[in-house]
């Protein structure tokens, strides 16, 4: 694996298709390739990396969407329905929901929106 004095090495796992079309169900993705890469430079953000942000987002998704709470109740029979539910959740989360710590929506904080979106505006996107 390549290394350098200023950088570090990183392994990237590439996976195959996770949807089994023959059995019409989701299955575990298989690793198809492992790529070794050299990461150069000194990043300040490297000291801020934490799994807490990802775990919090996963909890928010599980609490906000019934599809992720249990395997037997409220599951999606089609991958397309699951994708649509996740997209709708994230549009509402980022554009229509005012976050307590920000006091605005994340889209407004990032400069992507100038107002809190209504449900009607989200439905008009469909």
Image (spheres, rainbow, N blue to C red):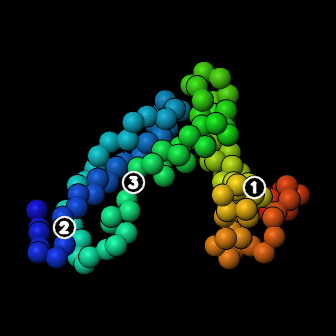
Viewer-closest of 106 and 30 = 106
Viewer-closest of 78 and 43 = 43
Taking the spot 60% from the left edge, 37% from the top edge, the residue there is: 62
In what quadrant of the picture does the C terminus appear?
A: bottom right
Q: CA distance from mark 3 to mark 2?
A: 18 Å
**Position of 32 relative to 49 (above/below):** above
Q: If you read the primary sequence from the N terminus, does the residue marked by circle 3 or circle 1 appear first?
A: 3
Taking the spot 11% from the left edge, 62% from the top edge, the residue there is: 1
Return the residue at label 3.
50
| Extreme residue in the right direction | 120
User: Which numbered dot is residue 71?
Assistant: none
Relative to 96, 28 lies left or right: left
Return the residue at label 1.
97
**Are the two marked residues, 3 and 2, in contact with CB atoms closer than 8 angstroms?**
no
Classify mark 2: residues with Cα within 10 Å, few (<14), some (14-19) or many (20+): some
Q: Secondary structure at mark 1?
A: loop
Relative to 121, 95 lies left or right: left
Residue 91 in sight here = no
Classify mark 3: residues with Cα within 10 Å, few (<14), some (14-19) or many (20+): few
Q: Position of residue 2 (x, y in %)?
A: 11, 68
Q: Position of residue 123 (x, y in %)?
A: 84, 56
**Position of 24 relative to 36 (above/below):** above
């Amino acid at each position: 694996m390549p290394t350098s004095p200023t950088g570090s090495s990183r392994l990237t796992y590439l996976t195959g298709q996770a949807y089994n079309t023959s059995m019409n169900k989701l299955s575990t993705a298989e690793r198809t390739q492992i790529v070794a890469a050299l990461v150069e430079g000194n990043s300040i953000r490297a000291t801020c990396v934490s799994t807490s942000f990802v775990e919090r987002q996963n909890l928010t998704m599980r609490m906000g969407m019934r599809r992720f709470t249990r395997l037997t109740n409220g599951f999606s029979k089609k991958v397309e329905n699951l994708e649509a539910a996740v997209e709708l959740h994230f549009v509402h989360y980022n554009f229509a929901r005012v976050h307590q710590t920000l006091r605005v929506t994340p889209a407004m904080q990032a400069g992507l929106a100038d107002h809190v979106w209504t449900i009607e505006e989200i439905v008009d996107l469909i």
